[in-house]
Image (tube, coloured by chain):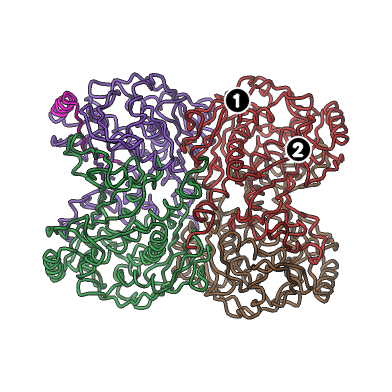
Chain colours: A purple, B green, C brown, D red
Amino acid sequence: MGNTFGQLFRATTFGESHGGGVGVVIDGCPPNIELSEREIQGELDRRRPGQSKVTTQRKEQDQCEILSGVFEGKTLGTPIAILVRNKDARPEDYLEIAGKFRPSHADFTYEAKYGIRNWQGGGRASARETIGRVAAGAVAKKILSVLYKKFEMVAYVTQIRDVVAKINRSSVKAEHAEKNIVRCPDGAAAKKMVSLIEEVRGFGDSVGGVIECVIRGIPPGLGEPVFDKLEADLAKAMLSIPATKGFEIGSGFAATRMPGSQHNDPFEMRGGRIRAATNNSGGVQGGISNGEEIYFRVAFKPTATIGREQKTVTSSRQQTRLAARGRHDPCVLPRAVPIVEAMTALVLCDHALRQRAITADRGSRIGE
Amino acid sequence: MGNTFGQLFRATTFGESHGGGVGVVIDGCPPNIELSEREIQGELDRRRPGQSKVTTQRKEQDQCEILSGVFEGKTLGTPIAILVRNKDARPEDYLEIAGKFRPSHADFTYEAKYGIRNWQGGGRASARETIGRVAAGAVAKKILSVLYKKFEMVAYVTQIRDVVAKINRSSVKAEHAEKNIVRCPDGAAAKKMVSLIEEVRGFGDSVGGVIECVIRGIPPGLGEPVFDKLEADLAKAMLSIPATKGFEIGSGFAATRMPGSQHNDPFEMRGGRIRAATNNSGGVQGGISNGEEIYFRVAFKPTATIGREQKTVTSSRQQTRLAARGRHDPCVLPRAVPIVEAMTALVLCDHALRQRAITADRGSRIGE
Amino acid sequence: MGNTFGQLFRATTFGESHGGGVGVVIDGCPPNIELSEREIQGELDRRRPGQSKVTTQRKEQDQCEILSGVFEGKTLGTPIAILVRNKDARPEDYLEIAGKFRPSHADFTYEAKYGIRNWQGGGRASARETIGRVAAGAVAKKILSVLYKKFEMVAYVTQIRDVVAKINRSSVKAEHAEKNIVRCPDGAAAKKMVSLIEEVRGFGDSVGGVIECVIRGIPPGLGEPVFDKLEADLAKAMLSIPATKGFEIGSGFAATRMPGSQHNDPFEMRGGRIRAATNNSGGVQGGISNGEEIYFRVAFKPTATIGREQKTVTSSRQQTRLAARGRHDPCVLPRAVPIVEAMTALVLCDHALRQRAITADRGSRIGE
Amino acid sequence: MGNTFGQLFRATTFGESHGGGVGVVIDGCPPNIELSEREIQGELDRRRPGQSKVTTQRKEQDQCEILSGVFEGKTLGTPIAILVRNKDARPEDYLEIAGKFRPSHADFTYEAKYGIRNWQGGGRASARETIGRVAAGAVAKKILSVLYKKFEMVAYVTQIRDVVAKINRSSVKAEHAEKNIVRCPDGAAAKKMVSLIEEVRGFGDSVGGVIECVIRGIPPGLGEPVFDKLEADLAKAMLSIPATKGFEIGSGFAATRMPGSQHNDPFEMRGGRIRAATNNSGGVQGGISNGEEIYFRVAFKPTATIGREQKTVTSSRQQTRLAARGRHDPCVLPRAVPIVEAMTALVLCDHALRQRAITADRGSRIGE
C-alpha cells in the first residue's frame, strides 16, 4: 500500500533499485494531450545519476519506454505505463549490508515492517524509486502547461549546509537553476556549494540543505478544504521524498515571530484583478490557491550513506561497524530538484482536475 | 471533496460555524472498543472556546452526541456519527464581511473556488470545523491505547512569538502541558506567553508560535512506503489544520546544517531490542516507525482575524477597510494543542490498522 | 469500512435502526445548486414505512434535517450532512432475537464479523440504513437534472413472484409507477400484486420480485474503463441494496441464448446523431454510456422476516425455533423502488463529475 | 481513471492490445508469500489465445515478467509489477475499423468519451487488457490459499446458448472444468458446446452463455456493510469483465418466484459449527460471508465481433457496412473462466485483508 499518489490524476510507482526495473502507471491523464518519450526523458536526465562530479557515479542512462496510453503521439485517456530498466546494478556492492542495518536508512524499518527486504541497493527505499515520480511529473507538467497558459514552475537549491544563496524568488526562472551543477541560481553561492560538497565527500561525509519551489500562473480556486488543502497535499508530497525533514509554505516558521498585523496579506485591486499586496500566505489561503505565486521550502537531511565508519547492529543483533562502499551522492539536493518539481506537479495537476469536476463549461460554475 | 481523512480509519467531517452543527462520521473503527460520549467530550472541552482568558469568548459548550456506531458502551464496527450543535451563533457579527474579503482568510478563495460562501463566521473555513477532527481523534486515541499498552501522546506549546520554552522532550507528560492555560510545560515561559497574548490582544493584534508533539509506545513498522510515509501523512495532517505554515520532524530544518556523520542515528542493542542511539530521525526511517519516540513541530501563523483596521477589497471589487468585530482568539495555539493531537492520532490509528492487514496472528507475519 | 459510495460524489451513510438516528454526509456536491429539505423529503416519503397497506406499519415520519452544506437555499460545495432521527423505535420487539439468529438475516454474519451487534431491529443491517442513500440520491438526481436537460429516471416493479407486468419500457414515466401502491405501471398487474402481497402476509409469509430502472437523457461518454464501467458500478450499487440477488443490464441473461448477429446493436444516423438501431446493450458499450436509454433489472428475494415459525440456533449454539414479531414488510419491492433510483443516481452523478474532470470548457476536450 | 481495483489489495492494470504490452501493478500484497513467474504463467496460459480450436488463433505466448516486488522467490510487500509484451500484433487487420464503429463494441463510446482511440485491435477495450487481471488474480489466489487452508475456487461454463450442463455444484473440482476445451465439467454437454461453437463460427456468427463460480473454505466474516457488501463487490467485479450482461448470487433471479418460508436458509448446528441448512443465500448474508459455499453465475453475451456483414456508421457519420476480418473468438466463455476466477480472487483477497485490519491477534477481535 501507499504506492499511489493522487485522487483523479493518480501515479502508482513500482520497482526496486536492483530488479527488473522501476516505473509508474499514470491513471486519469486527460486524452488528446501531445506526449512523447523525449519530454519524459528530459526530466529523467535531470534526475539521472552520474550527471556531474557532485553526484553518484552509478552509470544509468535511465532510458524510459512508454508501454501504453499514448497513440500516435497523443494521450488516450487510458493508463500511461512507463518503464525504466535497471542496468548498472551491482548487488555485490551491497553484500555487507545484507546483514547489517545502515544507520538512518530504511533497512531496519523495512525488516521490522515486512520481515523481509531486498537489501541490494536499498531495494524499494532507494532513491531510484523516484524515477517513476519524475516520469509522472513530466506528464503532469505537460497537462498543467496545456491548462494554464502562464504556468511556470521552478525549483532550486537555496542552501547547502551553511552556504545560503541570495535569490530573487519572484524573478527566478528555470534556466537560472539549470545553469550550474548544484542547481542554485546564485552563481557565487553555487561555486561555494560545489566546493563544500567535494570537500565533505573527501572526508567520507555528507551534507544537506534546502530546496525552494516557486509556481506561477495557477488561477485562484485549486485546493480542497478541509483535509486536502493545497498546502497539506504539498507537504505530504514533499515529506514523501526520501531524506526530507521539513516543509514550510510562504512565511513558514518565520511566521511564528510576526504579529498578525504584519503577517496578513491585504487585498487590493491590481491589473483589474483582486490581488494580495504581500504574499506571506505563499499563494494559498484556507487551503485554496489565491492566484498569487505559490512557494515553499523543503529541508533535506545530509545523505545517510557515508564513507566514514559508523556503529550499528547486524540483523542477528550483534554490535558491529559499517562504512559504505556503494556509489552514492554526498549531497542529494542537486538531483532532488526535479523530484521536488515532479511531486509539485502531481499535486497541482490532481487539484486542477478535481476543480474541473465541479466547474462548468465556459469557466463558469455549475448552476450559474 | 477533501473532507475525508484516512484509508482504513476514515474520518469525514461536516459543518459550518453557523448552521445546524458540526461533526464527523468515523468509518473503519474496530468493534468491541469501549467508548463513551464522556471520553470524546473530554477532548472537545480542551478545544472549546471560552475556556480561559486567552481564548475567544464565544460561548459554546460543544456538547457532543454519538448518533450511531456504539451500542451498550462498545463500538459496533459500524460508522460512528458524532454531532455537536451550534449554539452561540451570531451571524449579525459577520454582516460586514458578507461583502468584504478578510485579509489572509479564506473568504476570497472560497468565493473564487465555489462562487458562493457562507460568510457567517467563516463558514466551513472556520476553526469550528476542527470539532469533528477532535472527536474522531478521541476515538483514535482510544484505539491506540488498546492496541499499544505503552502508548502516550503529548502536544504542547513550545514557542509563542519570541518566547521560547525550555522543555525536556523525553520526559514531558500530558499533565505538564495541561497545567496552564497556554498548554506550555515550562511554567516560567507560560507566564510570559500569557502576558504576551494579553498584551497583543490589547493592541488589537495577534501572535503565532510553535507546537511540538511527542508520541511514545509506537512499535516499529507503522508507515507505508513510498507516498504514505508516516512523516508524509503527519505533514499532511498538520498542514491541514487552519493557520499552520510549516512542519518538521526530528531534526527538521536544523538537519540541513549538520554533517551526515553527526546526523545519522547509530543502531545499538539496548534492553534486548535494536535501538537508535540518537533520534535525529524523529522516530521514523524510510517512512516507517523505528520504535523510538516520534516527535515533530508545527508552525502556526498569527491569527488572521485582528481588531486593527486593514486594507482590503469588497466582493464588488472596491477598495475598502476592515476591522474585525467578531469574537476571536488572539493566539490559536492553546486551543490548537488538542487538534494537533487529534490529527496525529488519526494518522497513527490509520497506519496501525493498515499494518494489521498485512501481519499475521500472533504478531508474526503472513507466510511465516 | 464500506460505508462510502462514489469517487467524486461521495455519500457516507451512518446509523442503526435503533439509536440516535440515520443519515448521510455527501462530499463532492458541486456548489450553487438549489437544494431544499422539501426535495429530499419528497424522496424519503416514497421510501417511508407505513405509507400503504402493503408496507410495514412502523410509524416513522422520517423527517430530514440538513445540518450543513446548504446556505440560503444553495449548495456551498462543502459536505451536506442530512440527519433523520429514529422515533418509533421499539427495542422490546427484538428482545427475542438478541440471542437468536434470524434465518437469512445478517444477525449471524455481523456477530461472526464483529463479535458484537446491535440486535435491536437489525441495527446497521436494517433497511432503515437506506434512508441515507435515498437522501443522497435526491441530491444526485437534482444535480443530474441541472447537468442534463433531458434527464429522466424511472424505476418500477415489473414482477412480484409470478405476477409479471406488461410495460412499454420506452414510454413509461415516473407518474405511471407512482399511481399505485406497488409502484407497477401496469394497473392490472398491480392489482394482482397487491392481492398476492396481502395473501402471503396472511400466511405469515413473504414474496420477492423484480424492479426495472430506465434512465434517459444521459449523453455518450459516462463510465470509466476498465473496472469502473458504468454497468459494473450499477451492479455494485444494486447488489449493495438489502435483499437483492441479481442484476442484469440490457438483454441480460437472455443475451446468453441469442446469436451475435441478432444481439449486436447496429449503428445508424438518426436525428443527426449516431444512434444504436436496437438497444440490447442497455445504453452502455465497453463500460461507457452510448447515449441510448440505460436500463437494467434487479432481483429481490422474498423478505427474510416472516411470521411463520422457522428453525434456527441461538448465539449459545442451541437449536431453537423463531417466529418474527416485529413490524415488517411482506414484500420490500414497493419501498425499494426509490432506493434503486437513489443508488442509480449516485452512480450516474459520480460518473458525470468524473467525466467533467477530463473534458474541457465549451464541451470540447482538453488539448483540442 | 477506473483502472484500479480493490481497497487494500489493489490491482492497477495498463496496456492496449497493440502497443508495448499489457500488465498490472499490484499494491498491498503481504510480504513473505512464495511467488514465482511460473504460477502466474499457469493462469495466463488458461486465458491465452490460440489454446484450442474454439478460441481465436491470434498467436500470443503471453509470457509474463515480474519486474518488481519479489525477491529470492518471496513477495517483499512492495508493488509487484508484471509485464506481458504484445507480440503477434497485426494493426493492418484493423485498418478498416479505424474509421468505422463496430456494432456493440466500444469504438463509438471511446471516441465519444475521449475524442481519440487506439483503433488497433480495440485498444484498451480489447479483452487483452484482462491479462493484467489474470496475473493479479494468480497472486490473490496464492494469498487466499496461504490464509485459508481449505480454500478452493472453481469456475466453469454451465451454459452455451441453449446447451445447459448438469453439474453438481457442491462436488465440482477445478480439474473437472479443465478436462475439456470449453471448461464445462459435464462432458456430454461440453461436446455439444464444442460442436455448437464450431457451427456458429462457420456461419460467421457467435454465441454467449453462463459461467458459474464456486468458492469453498472462506470463513464467516468477509464483506463490508453497507456499500462494499461481498456480493456487491463480486457483482462489480463480474460486470467489469468485457461482454458480461448479468450477475446473480445464490438463488439469484429464481429467488423472485419463491416464498420467504422456502427461500430462507435455516440455521443448524453441524460439525460443531453454526451452519445454514440450505444455501439460497449463496454463502453471503447481509453482505458478509457466512462460511457456506459462495456461488454465483455470470451472463456473457455473444461475441460482438462477427464475420457476418453488419450495418454501421463511419466516424464521419456515413452509413456503411462492416464484416470483421481480425482473429477473434466465436465464444468468449472458455477463455473467460480464468478471468472470472481472477476477479473473484481479487475481491476475496481484498476483503480478507480488510477483515484482518479489524481482527486481533490469535483470531480474536480487538478489545477482547
Lateral position of residue D157 relative to residue D35, left or right: right
Q: Residues within 10 Å of mark 1 (few under 14, many from 20)?
A: many
Lateral position of residue A169 relative to residue D26, left or right: left
Is residue A199 located in the magenta-colored stretch of the structure? yes
Magenta segment, which residues?
A: A191-215
- Tell me the amino acid under the disc marked 2: Pro
What whole-number distance in Å separates the C-alpha atoms at marks 2 and 1? 25 Å
Provide residue A152's location: percent of width, then percent of height.
31, 37
Nearer to us in this view, B97 or A105: A105
Look at mark 2 in the image and give the residue it sits on.
C266
Quadrant housing residue A182:
top left
D292 versus C118 height, above or below: above
Label 1: which secondary element = loop
Q: Residues within 10 Å of mark 2 (few under 14, many from 20)?
A: many
The residue that appears at 55% across and 24% down in the rendered structure is D20
Nearer to us in this view, A171 or A59: A59
Is residue C191 located in the magenta-colored stretch of the structure? no
Label 2: which secondary element = loop
Circles 2 and 1 on the same subunit: no
B214 versus D85 height, above or below: below
Quadrant housing residue A171:
top left
Q: Chain of mark 1?
A: D
Q: Chain of mark 2?
A: C
Quadrant housing residue D174:
top right
- Tell me the amino acid under the disc marked 1: His
Q: Are marks 2 and 1 in contact (CB under 8 Å)?
A: no
Look at mark 1 in the image and give the residue it sits on.
D18
Nearer to us in this view, C354 or A329: A329
Provide residue B91's location: percent of width, then percent of height.
34, 74
Badge nearest the viewer, 2 or 1: 1
